[in-house]
Each structure stands twice: as C-alpha cells, then as structure tokens.
Amino acid sequence: MPRNLHPVAWWIWALGLAAAVSRTTNPVLLGLVLAVLGLVVANRRSEAPWARAFKYYMFLALTVVAIRVVFRSVFGGDISTTMMHVWFRLPSVPLPSWAAGVQLGGPVTAEGTFSALYDGMMLGCMLACVGAANALANPKRALRVLPGALYELGVAVVVALTVAPQLVESVQRVHRARKLRGRSGLGWHALREIAIPVLQDALERSLRLAAAMDSRGYGRTGAAPTPVRRLTAGLMVTGMCGLCLGTFGLLDASTSRTVALPALVTGTVVSVAGLALGGRRVRRSRYRPDPWSGPEWGVVLSGLAPLVVLWSGVGSSLIGLNPSTFPLTWPSLPVVPALAVLVAALPAVISPPPFRAIDPSRCAAVTARPNRSEGADTGSGRLEVPA
Amino acid sequence: MIRFDHMTVTYSEQSSPVLRDVDLLVEEGELVLVVGPTGAGKSTFLGTVNGLVPHFSGGTLAGRVTVGGRDTRAHRPRDLADLVGVVSQDPLAGFVTDTVEEELAYGMEQLAIAPDVMRKRVEETLDLLGVADLRDRPLHQLSGGQQQRVAIGAVLTTHPRVLVLDEPTSALDPTAAEEVLATITRLVHDLGVTVLLAEHRLERVVQYADRIVEIHRNGRVTYGPPALVLATSAVAPPVVELGRLAGWEPLPLSIRDARRSARHLRQRLPAEGREPVRGRTGGTPVLRARNVVVRYGPTVAVGGVEVELDAGRVTALMGRNGSGKSSLLWALQGSGPRHAGTVTVDAPGRPGGLDPARLPAGEARRLVGLIPQTPTDLLYLDTVAAECRQADLEAAGAGDDRSSGVPALQLLEELAPGIDPLAHPRDLSEGQRLALVLAIQLTAAPPVLLLDEPTRGLDYRSKEHLGAVLGRLAAGGRSVVVATHDVEFAAKVADRVIVMAAGDLVADGSAVDILTASPAYAPQVAKILAPAHYLTVDQVATALRSTSP
C-alpha cells in the first residue's frame, strides 16, 4: 500500500551511508554509492516541492569536487615532482618567505589531481547522501518527531519554513507597487522603500500568527519551574559536548577509541536525560503519527549495513578503501564493501511507494485555475453534526 | 455564556477608553453581531472574549469578563482555547501547519486530545464544512472561501462553546462569503455554538443575528434585538435604510420581509427604472485595450480581453476571487505583465496614444494611476507630510507640465479633511490611508485611475465618502475603474459594470442592467423592488420626492 515512510528511517539510512562514505576515497565505491542514491531517490521520492532538492545537492557536490581540484592545482602545486607525472606547469608566482608552504601555480601532477578528485568525491558523496534524505523525507514531518522538550524549536522552524516564501512574495509585491509611484531605480533608496513596507508587513503578520497560536492553545502547558529549567539546560549542554567530542574522536583516526566511545555514550545518555526531563512537563498529543514497522526497519538496516562493513574493515584492506595516488594505481573494487553498498539500494524496492498527496491530474486542474470557482463546490455542504 | 461586567478597556498610549462600561450578557447559542464604525473598537471587543485583550494586546481592562464561568483575568488565551475559538480576518496569517488535515488537528494536539478522538473529530469536521475533498491540499493553494472554512474548522475541532469571528468575509467575493456565512449559521443552529461576529457589510448577516452589539465612537455600546438597535444605529444595511425611509414597522431585516412590506411602495414608484441613474453620460474613450492576455506559467489569468474606458465614468470591475480582475488592472497600468495585446491611452500631443507599458514607470503613472490591493505597499516614510512631500517631488521629477501641480497635502485635505500631517501613515484608519495613497497617485494627474479592492475594511460612512470622491474625480473628466466584490458599493458609484470570470469578460453594460440581471450581483434595493430597476436607497428617495406632489 502506498504510504510515506517514516522520515527518521530515511535519515538514518542516509546518514549511515554518509558515515560509511567517510571511510573511503575509492572512486569506484563512491560512484557506486552515487548510483545507489540516484536509484532510490528516483524510485521513492514524492511529488512535493522538497523532493526536487536532490538535484541541487548534486550541483553542490559537483561544485565541491571542482573547487577541491582547482584549488589543489593552483595553490597546492607539488614542490618535489620526482616520480610524479607532470601534466603541465601553471605559471608560478614567487611568494614572500612568510607565506612558506603556500605556492601559487607550479606543476600540476596526475597524482595530486587524482588525490584531490578522490577527496572531493568523498565530500560530494556525503553531501549527496544528505540531499537524498532531504528529497525523500518531508522536512516538516521529520520535525514532528522531535522530542517534546524540543517542540517549541520545531514549531519555530516550521513557521520559518512557511514564512520564508511569504516574505519573498511580499518583496515582489512591494517592488511591483514601487513602480506605481514611478520609482524603479535601485540602490539605497530602493532598499529603504522595499524594506520598510516588507518589514512592517512581516511584523504585522507575525503578530497575527502569534495571536492565532495563543488563541489555539500553543504553549498551554506552561513553563517549568526555574531550577528544573536550569537543570535541563545544564544536562543538554554537557550532553552535547560529550556527543561532539565522541563523534570527533570516532571520525578522527588519530584519537584513541577508548576515549571517544565512552564520551559518545555518556554524551548520549546525558542528552537523553535532559530531553526526558524537559519533555516531562509537556502534555500534548500527536495527530496521525507516522507508523514505524517492517519497511522502516528494512530501510534502516540497509543503510547501516555499509556503515558496519566499512568501519569494521571486513573483507577489505585499507588500500582497497583508500587507493594509493602515489604511486598512482588503478583503484580496485573491494568486493565485500561493494556488496554492502548495494544492500543500501534495497529501499528502492522494499520501502512502500510514496503516497501521492495530490493527484497529479487534479494538481494540473488546480494550477490551471488557482482559485477555483467558489460556487462550484457549494453542493458539498453536508449537514453532519459532530458527536 | 459570556458576561461582560462593567468592562472598560484603555490602551496605554490613549487618553480615553476604547470601550466604556460594557455591561451585557450573551446567552448560550446566540448569534451576536458586532457592528460599529471602523476604529471604534470592534476587534478590541472581540479580543476581550478570549483574553487576547489585554493579555496579548496590552492595555488595561477594568471590570470583569467571564466566559463559561472562567474569568479572563486569571485565564490566558491559551487557557481558554478549549472554550473559545477565534477566527481572524485573514485566515492565511493564522495557519500554523501546511495542509488542511494537520491544520484541523493542530488545536487538538495542543489540548492533548487522544489520537483516536482526534482522528474522528477531524473526519467529522471535514464533512461538516464540506472540505473533505481538500484534506491533503496545501493551505495556500485553497481559494479564499475554502481557507476561511478551514480556519473555522480548525477552531471547531476542539469543540469550543463560543466562536469569535472578526470580519471573516471581508476578503471574499459575494458567493464565497455566502458560503462562509451559511456555515456559521448552520453551526449556530445545529451545534448551539455561541457566535460573536463582527462584519462591515451588514446586508449579508443582519438577518441571521439574534442580537446586535453596536459600538459607538465614544466607546459606549448598545445591545439589543436587531430591529431595535438598527432603527437608530449609525450603520445600517440598505434594507434597513429603505425600511426607515418608507417607515415600515417593524423594521424588516431580510429581503423576504422587506419584499412583503414593499408591496405598496412598489406600486407608488415609477415601475420603469428609466429615470437617469447618473448625471454623467458616456464620454469618449481614453483607454483602449485590445486582446490583453496575462499568463502565469500555464495559468491564463486574463484571456484576450477587449475593453474601452470612457472619460468621465466610473466602471466597476466585478467577478469572483481569482477571476483575473487584479491581473487586468495591472496589465492596463503597464507595471504588471502583459503577454499579448495592446493598450493605448490618449495623451495630449500624441495622436496615436501611448502604451503605458512601453514608458518608464514615472511616465506611465501620468497616464494610468493604480491603487493596489494593499495600498500601504506604497508608503515608506514616517509621517503623512513626508509622504506628501515625496509625492510632490516624484510628480515634479519627470519635469513636464502635465502634472496636476496641486500639492499632495492639499489633495489629501480635499479627499479626507482633518488628517494630522505629522501622524504616522500606519496609525491612520483604513479610509484615511486609502485617501493618502489616492492623493499621492493623483499628484501625477492620470486621466485613468484604477483602484483594486478599495473598500476592504471600510465602514459604510468611509465607503460613502470614497464613493463621493470617485464621483467627483469622474465628473472632473477622469475615467475611474474600481475592482470590487462589494455589490452595494458598486451600485452606489458605478455607471458601468464589467463582470469577469476565468479571465474573460462575461458581461459589460450599464450598472442598472448588469446589477439587476443576476441575483448574485444584485444589491438589496434591487432585490426588494424588482422588477422596478432601482439600485440604491438614494434613487428611491429621489423618485419618491418627484412622484409625491
């Protein structure tokens, strides 16, 4: 049955894949990951506006690769080029002695370029993973699963997401209205003439929204007593520090795991305690929460599979995951990691197809006449009384 | 249900109270209509019901307001959310989520209502309001009437005992407004909800009201049955004015009652409405539009419209929301997009006329002036005087002799006397702000003046005044076009009426012919006196004077 997969499942899947990607610079593996992402996104994204995000993330990824390669060629020219394949030499600019270590121009070598390309591909691939999650999961529904303590934060983000397009619309409207006074120039005056009406408009609108939310019971459960609030804040900050330290330690190869893992675990526990304490005062219910069932587990596991395989190093050597660029060799395809990445493609099949919230044919009719006849649907006024 | 106990509200920056010694009791299940001139404190009165005044707005509330036994002093608006539902003028500004279904559930989520109950209530409410087919639609894609019905549904799901609506139909076309009002009356009758409703256009709602609260300028209120309050009230719908004129007793409030009472009056009046409705007759066309097309992507907003606008006439442009009225006005002015067709405006010294879209913005406004739907978009300075000075500079800027030469401040004084030049434009009333923008646009002395929905938020007196101003402008040889939903306003000011639907002109003719032809666009007087062709109470009064010796 078509339904929307739980947004958290998509995020775990994508982040698992991204974390796996961070272990390898093998272009073949990275290409495989991109192919997997493309397949799943193409198969399982919905019609919603955010579903188009993947394309933009891909552009961003390409930009990252390009910048990485260009910078390496221009600024990171190799000083000693013995045993290297020099493609061509850029005109070199001698820099003063205080800029030692930085070089402008110089020889561009195959080794250096490929090393930059592989690094860039890794970063780009991680970006693509985030892009896939954004395209597959409804950001607003994802925010709904935030724990109760962070509810206000979630609402603020949702409101911001809603208001941003309105602000753009408001700027366009005022800009158009300026012409009616015969003013079309740009510059300082234009800024003032547009900004003041737009800001006044935005302020009035936000006051109206605040009044509406207040009238509808937002923030009804009231604030916690000050000591509890301080304790919550303290727990959250400590927990976050622990989480950051732990994550950094795990990702940075030079830090010992014996420090990183306990820091991560403690950080998680303290953060969860803080969230639980903060969320205790909240009394609120959730309308039609997204279910979590078989397909969600499947998607999560398929995303974690490459993570586990690549981090444990099963079935591949370090050289397989990070092919040497000095000397330059053909990258090999490590079989086990490749299979693990392919497992991550399973959601393209095992997850339910997305629920089409808007029937495409009806959507076309709506865009053709945005404000459909008011009179046309008067017949639907049924007389039914709620119990 | 709601008890106002000697309530007086004073805002901190004002010396005199907005509401003075309000003492009344609203019974359960009543539909109470709140009337009064703009700025008299209707919104303040409604705000006191759920505590937004003074908890949210600031100010001081003396006395006591109790709703369902709860004192608003001790209960904030959020604490009354299960008891009072509030629907505002602009539904889009109050939406928190982005789809219909989630919006309906939002209030219940805040009240921690059990998920299975929520699900059931959402379904019931979808049916009750007839929006079940829209459940997954994004809120911003809905039409105005649908949005307003969703906004009502969103507060109904918490099963409030009191519903407060602040001008819920002011942005809607007549049909959509009918739909929303029908929904409200159904709620009163079927669910026994107590409703407090503020509305400018009394003609739409007065027949449904059980009681009326009239708020006077000095902050005092009158409370009583509609016929009693309206007999003396400063604001009254045409049906009541006609009743007063003809001396009907009891005062009719609905078309049905009025038609019964009017049997005699119809016989006395000259049956044929051929007496000159307006003194101004058709002039020469100053603006010619041929085959104007405006598209937004695949959407055709204006589909090949042909229209000529005559000097010295007021034209009302009518049609439901989204029928292309605004797009047409913007295309005629030249600032908006126009994808095909031609617009030519007569200009002195140019035999062929000029196309405003091909001129720089400063030149185009000398040919066609436009007051947009939100006139405040044009204002950005601190004081009225500064805006007027700026307008004079803009008019002089292009440096030719075609500008009126009349300073904006003087024009403003003619349009709306008594505005403090040092006031901030945002502090003016709706009507005064409109006059300010009108004065700014008139400094360019355009022969064609277009107004997009100028009557939004105006009370009867401001509308009367605006009508007189537009009449004067037309008498001075201008061609005036008013896009409006307000049938009664069109009946008062228009010589000619154009009706648009789905981007096409579907009717074009004299105001009498068009406005009496269809029930949706007929003013109350026309409905009461049909088949005689009368549009306004003034016309009837004139006719009576001429027939009686």
Image (cartoon, rainbow, N blue to C red):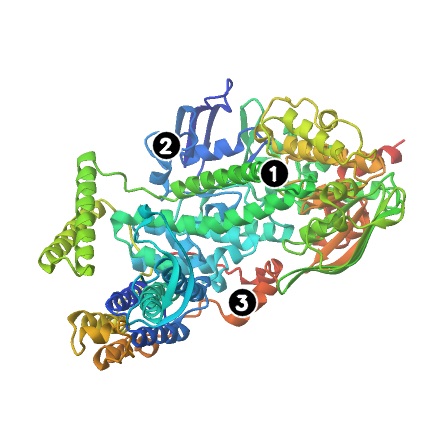
* Whether label 3 touches label 1, CB < 8 Å: no
Residue for badge 2: B72
Residue for badge 3: A363
Distance between the Cα atoms at labels 3 and 1?
A: 33 Å
Snapshot quadrant of residue B379: top right
Q: Does residue A285 sit above or below B87 in this rendering?
A: below
Mark 1 or mark 2: name the one nearer the start of the chain: 2
Secondary structure category for the residue under label 3: helix
The percent position of residue A335, horizontal first and vertical second, equals 23, 82
The percent position of residue A359, horizontal first and vertical second, equals 49, 70
The percent position of residue B357, horizontal first and vertical second, equals 75, 50
Q: Please name the amino acid that badge 3 sits on.
A: Cys
One can see residue B336 in this view: yes
Same subunit, labels 2 and 3: the answer reads no
Q: Please name the amino acid that badge 1 sits on.
A: Gly
- Packing grade of label 2 (10 A; few <14, some 14-19, many >=20) is many
Q: Please name the amino acid that badge 2 sits on.
A: Thr
* Nearer to us: label 2 or label 3: 3
Distance between the Cα atoms at labels 1 and 2?
A: 28 Å
One can see residue B152 in this view: no
**A93 left or right, relative to B253:** left
As rendered, which of B308 and B400 lies closer to the eye? B400
Residue for badge 1: B457
Distance between the Cα atoms at labels 2 and 3?
A: 45 Å
Q: Chain of mark 2?
A: B
Secondary structure category for the residue under label 1: loop
- Packing grade of label 3 (10 A; few <14, some 14-19, many >=20) is some
- Packing grade of label 1 (10 A; few <14, some 14-19, many >=20) is many
**A78 left or right, relative to B501:** left
Q: Does residue A210 sit above or below B135 in this rendering?
A: above
